[in-house]
Image: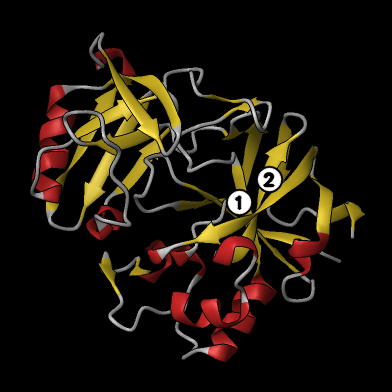
């Protein structure tokens, strides 16, 4: 039976993720997922596409406190009650909105870690970013609340390359096992645990998947994007790997839950 084998959360967009045994899913995705985003002082968002060293930063957030760690820096810990009362205009691709500033000390820590001026923004308790095309509010993710990939799809990719690629390169929230490679491409609606999910669109991939998450550096061989482009190129010439999801209800999910296919091709 298809089974949920991993849950990954990324409290700060483009930084390292961490695994969970169970999680709550809401309209905006996993609770506490991508609640923060690193930006330039003018509000322009930064990602590992241009700043791969972001993936060397690890974040933990429980809704009250944010902790940042880095191999070369002392950990930084701050409470939401310490955040300043300031908003900043920002955008994620075509979506423009405002988000809350955090604390000057956070900005200093990030600026030193990235070796350039940077700030950290917070969505607050409720995201101000509403995507009409989806009919839901979304966190700081590129466009969708959740991303799912099957382990078999990654295994197939590794058979076509040097076998060194890891799931962290693709930054899914949900990983499933026990299906054929790319079976997720055929799903329309699924249920995991208490949550019914709409499989909304395939995930278009970019150079970000070439970042080695352990080193925070792009691979010189441009893999696995180069290989994916040879057999996963779709509409508009984009390269697809994984599926974007929208939750139809809130609820709990846990590693080991069965994935039930409610509607498919």
The residue at the point 61 percent across, 44 percent down is 146
Q: Earlier in the sequence, mark 1 or mark 2?
A: 1
Which of the numbered marks, if any, corresponds to residue 147? 1
Image position, residue 44 (x, y; %): 26, 35
Whether 107 is drawn above or below 82: the answer is below
* Label 2 element class: strand
The residue labelled by disc 2 is: 245
* Label 1 element class: strand
Give the quadrant of residue 60.
Answer: top left
The answer to whether any part of residue 211 appears in the image is yes
The residue at the point 26 percent across, 41 percent down is 68
The residue at the point 75 percent across, 63 percent down is 185
How many C-alpha atoms fall within 10 Å of the one at disc 1: few (<14), some, or many (≥20)? many
Image position, residue 144 (x, y; %): 58, 41
Whether 174 is drawn above or below 99: the answer is below
Image position, residue 201 (x, y; %): 68, 50
């Amino acid at each position: 039976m298809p089974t949920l084998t991993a849950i990954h959360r990324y409290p700060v967009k483009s930084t390292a993720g961490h695994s969970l045994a169970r999680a709550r899913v809401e309209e905006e995705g996993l609770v506490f997922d991508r609640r923060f985003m690193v930006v330039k002082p003018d509000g322009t968002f930064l990602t590992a596409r241009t700043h791969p060293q972001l993936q060397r930063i690890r974040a933990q957030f429980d809704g009250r406190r944010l902790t940042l760690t880095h191999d070369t820096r002392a950990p930084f810990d701050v409470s939401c009650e310490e955040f300043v009362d300031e908003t900043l205009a920002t955008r994620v691709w075509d979506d423009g909105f405002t988000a809350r500033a955090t604390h000057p000390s956070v900005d200093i820590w990030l600026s030193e870690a990235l070796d350039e001026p940077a700030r950290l923004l917070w969505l607050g308790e409720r995201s101000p970013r509403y995507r009409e095309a989806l009919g839901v509010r979304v966190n700081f993710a590129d466009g969708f609340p959740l991303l799912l990939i099957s382990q078999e799809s990654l295994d197939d990719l590794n058979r076509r390359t040097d076998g060194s690629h890891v799931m962290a390169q693709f930054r899914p929230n949900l990983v499933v096992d026990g299906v054929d490679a790319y079976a997720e491409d055929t799903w329309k609606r699924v249920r995991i645990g208490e949550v019914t999910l709409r499989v909304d669109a395939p995930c278009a991939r970019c150079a970000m998947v070439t970042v080695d998450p352990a080193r925070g550096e792009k691979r010189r061989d441009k893999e696995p994007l180069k290989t994916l482009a040879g057999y996963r190129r779709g509409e508009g010439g984009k390269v697809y790997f994984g599926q974007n999801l929208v939750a139809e209800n809130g609820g709990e999910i846990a590693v080991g839950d069965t994935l039930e296919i409610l509607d498919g091709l």
